[in-house]
Image (cartoon, coloured by chain):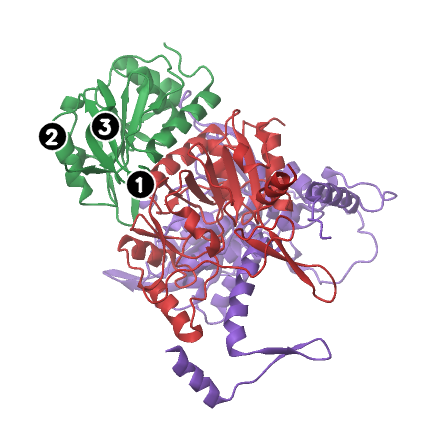
Chain colours: A green, B red, C purple
């Protein structure tokens, strides 16, 4: 079996600080400091996020569970898996083009909007010199971000969710060693 | 007895970290969390301590202040706690800190993007003194129904000619959630608006945490004909001469003679050092 | 020239020295041993374990000694220590039916199967201070041991379907208040956990209020039993139950006002209390408050403080209450300065102050006409 974090206490702390800044400063990629080994199809960067945030008290939905993968995350993190997208606290998308639509995940309820899913989406790449323009809390003026590897419909689904704010879903995208986050409050600007 | 780094066990840190991420995603909304009993009493900063403990790493430089000062007894106690359970470097200089835990003040020195400010919060619910029931205030937030607060402020004006709230002055975050900025004087409220730094709020006893992301619009409640105003003094700081900072009133003799000094001790000593240089 | 106040660290260090000195007291007097506290202050130990939510008599004794007998401080010490302990899992539900009973009484029947077993209790003492040192007594052992599975008094009523039945099957998995925050409305299991950790004095007062008309529930002490109960875990790796020890518990089942309706005939209703060690007052208070908090489920008019779930459960924890009440000792001068500023502004224009010869400030009382004039000016 593959190992996980070499230094769980400090590796998860350093990873968390990047995730926190990613969520606080949306659409601005952060470098993940630790890349633990990971069974396919989960990439090391995405595994770092799973190991940092998930444990026996969270419900995780894996888009492409393999026996080795399930064994790995159960052993190293005590993860509880679910087959129901609506029950997932965290969902791991390893094939985003065919991922379930966003409305199949928990959006929270008006009195507890925090009871909503967080999605970790493995994509091909992202860049900030071009792309869609975003604004909202955490972004000083606007921020450009282009994400390669998502379905066409993804942004329509996300826009549809925006009508339900403060309910919503919060997203982490990973590519190679970087993570970029889009909390529900980040607005896509129409140009 | 050896403790896990920063005292909390990893399960607790993960629980806090998940809650903090949701808090940042929903600015100003109070996320319930499984607050633990800490070696300091509830009401003395356990929320701030748990947030700091979830964030803290060996490379951080930690500053802890209470009433703006590094040397007040509770700030000393909390700083000692973290030195003991995390061995982390500590500082009294705002500019050198990566993580600042504070009770009741925001530093006068502007914060940077690489800094995080953690507030100790006694009562996270801005409507609590108007509505004691949590079940009810949850619903009011769900509906963004903040009439109770507007009525209270209006009644102050009717009775006193002024809004009678001088600290813990309620703010609207990102135009959506009514939030308590913690009992900072209203003087500090403008610093919340569009700050480069991330601001996190921990209420241990009430078991809620919340966040104001950087560059987020934060507006202090007011009326068009009674706009929000900060406190001003007729005095300068006796020690450094500042007329821009929040001043503490000090009684210096038994005839009641007063003088005023900066509440932010680092800001004050920095100014005095500059003058001497 | 004014010199800024410094030296907080030294002040704290000195305060700790003074505390250590005060804690020890007169050094000519022998230091208390933990075994003495555990053995001879067992009821204090029981309370600290219960509200500290940690069954360990030696640790509770240590906390009591460290806290110089301040029970709330000892409870806080134990709770803070508990936070650091690793969590292995959950035990099987404690089987109090199999309790090795040392005391068991009922107020509802003159005699019951198994008998009224009085056990070690202050109930039959006269409260006269004993100035002579307590004589060492030798207790004559019983010839006949107590029956192993003492039948439950409430089962006698259940046989006639006279008492409400609460089937285990209806019970959802309880949440753990030491891990999750309390949310409202709280279900019964959550309420019971909150009450079990709650301050005995607060619960006693709440319970007392229900006996004086603030949501009277006509209680009877159906059964109070105290004794040792086995603690059993069922580790996933083994797949079978393992007994890991036993603890002393006090259990109280109250029989309360009967209710009926919705096709169900009138039946007595239940209230339940459980405490570690010999915690009878706590278990009884808990049972009374438990029953009272079931008011919505039992369609009772909700008007009394002890029926107010948010009020009772939000204020029951002594660690929270003590922390917040006492936090007022912390410096609040920044906010006080803000209030002073504000008040001076409000006062100065309306009520000019003169200082008299005695050093006391006096303001000009304003006549009602002048007050009205000012009102007009304001608007």
Residue bearing the label numbered 1: A137
Question: Relative to B213, is C270 above or below?
Answer: below
Decide which of tag 2 and tag 3 comes sooner along the chain.
3
Q: Tag 1, which secondary structure? A: loop
Query: Which chain letter matches label 1?
Result: A
Question: Which residue is denoted by mark 2 in the rendering?
Answer: A153
Q: How packed is label 3: few (under 14 Cα within 10 Å), some, or many (20 or more)?
A: many
Q: Is residue B76 left or right of residue A91?
A: right
Q: Position of residue C259 (x, y in %)?
A: 33, 64
Label 1 Cα crowd, 10 Å radius (few <14 / some 14-19 / many 20+): many
Residue tagged 3: A145
N-term mark: 1 or 2: 1
Q: Chain of mark 2?
A: A
**Which label sits in the foreground, 1 or 2?**
1
How far apart in space, not on screen, are marks 1 and 2 (Cα)? 25 Å
- Helix, strand or loop for disc 2: loop
Q: Nearer the viewer, residue C141 or C377?
A: C377
Above/below status of B126 relative to C143 = below
Alpha carbons under labels 3 and 1: distance apart: 16 Å
Residue C22: image location, x then y, percent: 78, 47
Question: Hey, which quadrant is residue C298 in on the image?
Answer: bottom left
The CA span between labels 2 and 3 is 17 Å
């Amino acid at each position: 079996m593959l190992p996980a974090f070499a230094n769980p206490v400090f590796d998860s702390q350093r990873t968390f600080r990047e995730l926190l800044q990613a969520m606080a400063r949306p659409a601005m990629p952060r470098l993940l400091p630790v890349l633990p080994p990971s069974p396919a199809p989960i990439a090391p960067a995405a595994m770092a996020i799973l190991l940092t945030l998930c444990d026996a008290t969270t419900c995780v939905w894996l888009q492409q569970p393999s026996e080795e993968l399930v064994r790995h995350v159960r052993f190293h993190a005590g993860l509880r898996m679910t087959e129901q997208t609506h029950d997932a606290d965290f969902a791991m998308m390893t094939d985003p083009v065919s991922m379930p639509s966003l409305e199949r995940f928990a959006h929270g309820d008006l009195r507890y909007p925090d009871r909503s899913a967080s999605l970790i989406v493995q994509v091909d790449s992202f860049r900030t010199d071009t792309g869609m323009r975003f604004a909202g809390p955490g972004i000083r003026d606007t921020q450009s971000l282009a994400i390669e590897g998502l379905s066409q419909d993804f942004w329509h689904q996300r826009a549809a969710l925006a009508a339900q704010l403060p309910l919503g879903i919060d997203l982490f995208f990973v590519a190679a060693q970087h993570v970029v986050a889009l909390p529900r409050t980040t607005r896509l600007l129409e140009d | 007895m050896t403790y896990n780094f920063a005292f909390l066990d990893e399960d607790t840190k993960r629980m806090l970290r998940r809650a903090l991420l949701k808090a940042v995603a929903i600015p100003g909304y109070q996320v319930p969390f499984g607050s633990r009993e800490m070696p300091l009493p509830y009401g003395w900063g356990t929320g701030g301590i748990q947030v700091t403990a979830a964030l803290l790493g060996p490379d951080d430089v930690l500053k802890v202040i209470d009433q703006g000062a590094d040397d007040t007894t509770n700030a000393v106690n909390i700083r000692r706690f973290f030195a003991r359970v995390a061995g982390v470097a500590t500082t009294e200089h705002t500019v050198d800190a990566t993580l600042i835990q504070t009770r009741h003040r925001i530093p006068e020195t502007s914060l940077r993007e690489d800094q995080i400010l953690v507030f100790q919060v006694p009562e996270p619910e801005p409507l609590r003194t108007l509505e004691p029931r949590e079940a009810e205030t949850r619903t009011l937030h769900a509906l963004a129904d903040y009439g109770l607060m507007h009525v209270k402020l209006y009644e102050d004006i009717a009775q006193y000619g002024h809004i009678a709230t001088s600290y813990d002055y309620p703010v609207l975050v990102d135009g959506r959630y009514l939030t308590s900025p913690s009992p900072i004087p209203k003087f500090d409220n403008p610093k919340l608006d569009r700050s480069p730094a991330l601001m996190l709020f921990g209420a241990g006893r009430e078991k809620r945490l919340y966040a104001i992301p950087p560059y987020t619009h934060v507006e202090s409640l007011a009326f068009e004909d009674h706009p929000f105003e900060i406190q001003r003094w007729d005095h300068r700081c006796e020690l450094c001469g500042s007329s821009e900072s929040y001043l503490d009133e000090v009684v210096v003799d038994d005839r009641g003679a007063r003088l005023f000094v900066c509440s932010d001790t680092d800001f004050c000593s920095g100014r005095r050092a500059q003058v001497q240089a | 020239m004014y010199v800024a106040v410094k030296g907080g660290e030294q002040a704290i260090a000195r305060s700790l020295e003074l505390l250590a000195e005060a804690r020890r007291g007169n050094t000519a007097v022998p230091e208390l041993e933990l075994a003495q506290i555990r053995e001879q202050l067992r009821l204090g130990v029981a309370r600290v374990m219960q509200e500290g939510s940690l069954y360990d008599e030696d640790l509770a004794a240590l906390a009591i000694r460290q806290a110089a007998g301040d029970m709330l401080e000892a409870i806080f010490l134990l709770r803070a220590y508990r936070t650091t302990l690793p969590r292995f899992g959950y035990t099987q539900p404690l089987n109090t039916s199999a309790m090795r009973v040392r005391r068991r009484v009922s107020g509802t029947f003159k005699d019951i199967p198994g008998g009224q077993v009085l056990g070690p209790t202050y109930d039959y003492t006269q409260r006269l201070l004993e100035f002579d040192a307590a004589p060492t007594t030798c207790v004559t052992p019983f010839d006949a041991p107590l029956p192993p599975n003492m039948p439950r008094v409430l089962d006698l009523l259940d046989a006639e379907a006279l008492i409400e039945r609460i089937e285990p099957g209806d019970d959802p998995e309880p949440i753990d208040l030491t891990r999750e925050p309390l949310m409202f409305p709280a279900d019964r299991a959550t309420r019971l956990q909150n009450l079990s950790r709650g301050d005995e004095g607060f619960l006693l007062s709440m319970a007392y209020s229900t006996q004086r008309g603030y949501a009277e529930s006509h209680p009877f002490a159906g059964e109070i039993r105290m004794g040792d109960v086995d603690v059993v875990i069922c580790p996933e790796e083994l797949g079978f139950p393992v007994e890991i020890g036993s603890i002393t518990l006090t259990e109280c089942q109250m029989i309360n006002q009967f209710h009926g309706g919705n096709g169900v005939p009138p039946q007595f209703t239940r209230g339940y209390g459980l405490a570690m060690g010999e915690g009878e007052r706590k278990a009884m208070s808990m049972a009374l408050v438990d029953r009272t908090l079931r008011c919505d489920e039992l369609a009772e008019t909700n008007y009394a403080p002890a029926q107010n779930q948010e009020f009772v459960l939000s204020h029951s924890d002594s660690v929270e209450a003590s922390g917040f009440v006492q936090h007022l000792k912390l410096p609040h001068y920044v906010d006080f300065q803000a209030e002073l500023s504000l008040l001076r502004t409000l006062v100065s224009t309306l009520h000019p102050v003169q200082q008299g010869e005695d050093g006391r400030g006096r303001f000009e009382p304003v006549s009602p006409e002048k007050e009205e004039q000012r009102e007009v000016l304001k608007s």
